[in-house]
Amino acid sequence: MAPANVRAAQAPSADRRLSTLVRHLLPSSPRRTAAEAAADASATLESFPTMASQGSSVFAALAQAPEDPILGVTVAYNKDPSPVKVNLGVGAYRTEEGKPLVLNVVRRAEQMLINNPSRVKEYLPITGLAEFNKLSAKLIFGADSPAIQENRVATVQCLSGTGSLRVGGEFLARHYHERTIYIPQPTWGNHPKVFTLSGLTVRSYRYYDPATRGLDFKGLLEDLSSAPSGSIVLLHACAHNPTGVDPTLDQWEQIRQLMRSKSLLPFFDSAYQGFASGSLDKDAQSVRMFVADGGELLMAQSYAKNMGLYGERVGALSIVCGSADVAVRVESQLKLVIRPMYSNPPLHGASIVATILRDSEMYNEWTLELKAMADRIISMRQQLFDALKSRGTPGDWSHIIKQIGMFTFTGLNSEQVAFMRQEYHIYMTSDGRISMAGLSMRTVPHLADAIHAAVTQLK
């Protein structure tokens, strides 16, 4: 082994290494000493705009982006030190104690997956877990659906409801002859962003009537009647977000007839199947009406709410096609949308869903837990209505018990919402939407006091 002083002499100095690097990176120049080259390199490298120097950045001119109007509510809530604060902003189920809930059947399914020594962590196909896709289509369309029996459904696993909408939007922007989608006014705040970035032109149709705090059915029909033939129409399958106002079955039938007569393409968003009424079949009735007529449609599904798999990002996009051979080609094109977007979906959440849906005993347990969640939300509606009535709060609050699902559109204006946040530490979106799932028997009186004060003090 060479002596230490010899090894040191043989090793290239830092100056020499930097000089060599500079010769590769910079234009040719007269031969210089290592020290000169190192000095020049240091000065040159410091001048490159992508190297931080004294706190500067190529992104220094960026403006601070605003908080998401929905998720930002939770950010503000978390900063509030008040012991009486209540978060009614984000749509996530909470127990009576105000805690997140993991369903017992979900824990059982996870344990089964963990205990299975044959499970691996390999990539899924681009379209996702095949069994999950098959079971998801059956859940929303019905096991006896003619579209499923005739192999006219192309289903791909996506990243919850948002991802399903985005994949569907990009597919339509590439392959459908109309690039305009009509969305209800109001709708979930992410809808216009998702579809705009998908490459579609977003327009709206009337949906909610502030005067009645119910459905503006006349305006809805008028706007869809005037939409260009072939336009895409976004429909909330049940538990409309943010209003909680759904059409009746008779109204759904009129909507279906109008849309089919004008060749309008339905794009359903189903985020609350079973979570609205407590019945999976009842909450899918609107969708199944459209499938039964043999026409085509798109369907975005999410398991965030009805299985409590919020963070697992589990969803599916199904496209009901006119024939089996078209469905095969549609699936092939969906792969080309997904591959450069996120390559393939995650395994764990879809495996949980498939485990529950394939096993009749676990499926029945899920439906019981699902109904218990829906029933608690319905109970919160009644308790809030009763509390406002007992206080003599001005106005008709019957819409609270008429609306359905996770959210109630209270009718409170932005000034009243700000007042309730400031004075009562109650957090909701500025349009007055509240998540009924965030309420409890303990917090209902506090909310009723806040609403009463806001309504009586601020007109």
Image (cartoon, rainbow, N blue to C red):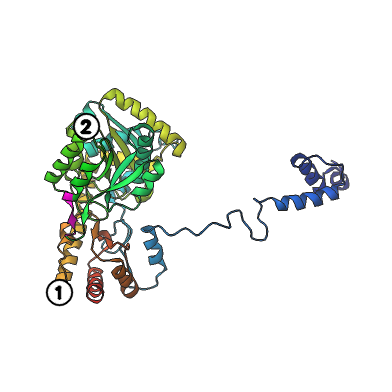
Please provide percent x and percent y for residue 417: 30, 68
Image position, residue 138 (x, y; %) = 24, 35
Amino acid bearing label 2: Gly
Relative to 230, does residue 314 appear above or below in the rendering?
below
Residue range (magenta): 212-218
Does residue 214 show up magenta in the picture?
yes
Mark 1 or mark 2, earlier in chain: 2
Q: CA distance from mark 1 to mark 2?
A: 50 Å
Asked whether the beta carbons under mark 1 and mark 2 sit within 8 Å of each other, the answer is: no
State the residue at coordinates (78%, 46%).
18
**In this orientation, which residue lies closer to the viewer: 438 or 234?**
234
Categorize mark 2 by other alpha carbons within 10 Å: few (<14), some (14-19), many (20+): some
Which picture quadrant has residue 454? bottom left
Give me the residue at 26% from left, 38% from top.
Answer: 228
Q: Which residue is mark 2?
A: 295
Looking at this view, is 426 or 375 the one in front?
Answer: 426
Q: What residue appears at the point 25 percent right and 66 percent down from the top-left corner?
A: 412
In the rendered image, which quarter contains the C terminus?
A: bottom left
Q: Quadrant of the N terminus?
A: top right
Give the quadrant of residue 221: top left
In this rendering, the answer to whether 356 lies above or below 82 is above
Pick the residue in front: 381 or 409.
Answer: 409
Residue at label 1?
392
> How packed is label 1: few (under 14 Cα within 10 Å), some, or many (20 or more)?
few
Q: Nearer the viewer, residue 204 or 126?
A: 204
* Up/down of 73 relative to 320, above or below: below
Q: Which mark is residue 258?
A: none
Residue most toward the bottom?
Answer: 457
Amino acid tagged 1: Gly
Q: Position of residue 113 (x, y in %)?
A: 36, 41
Residue 72 screen position, x and y as percent: 39, 61
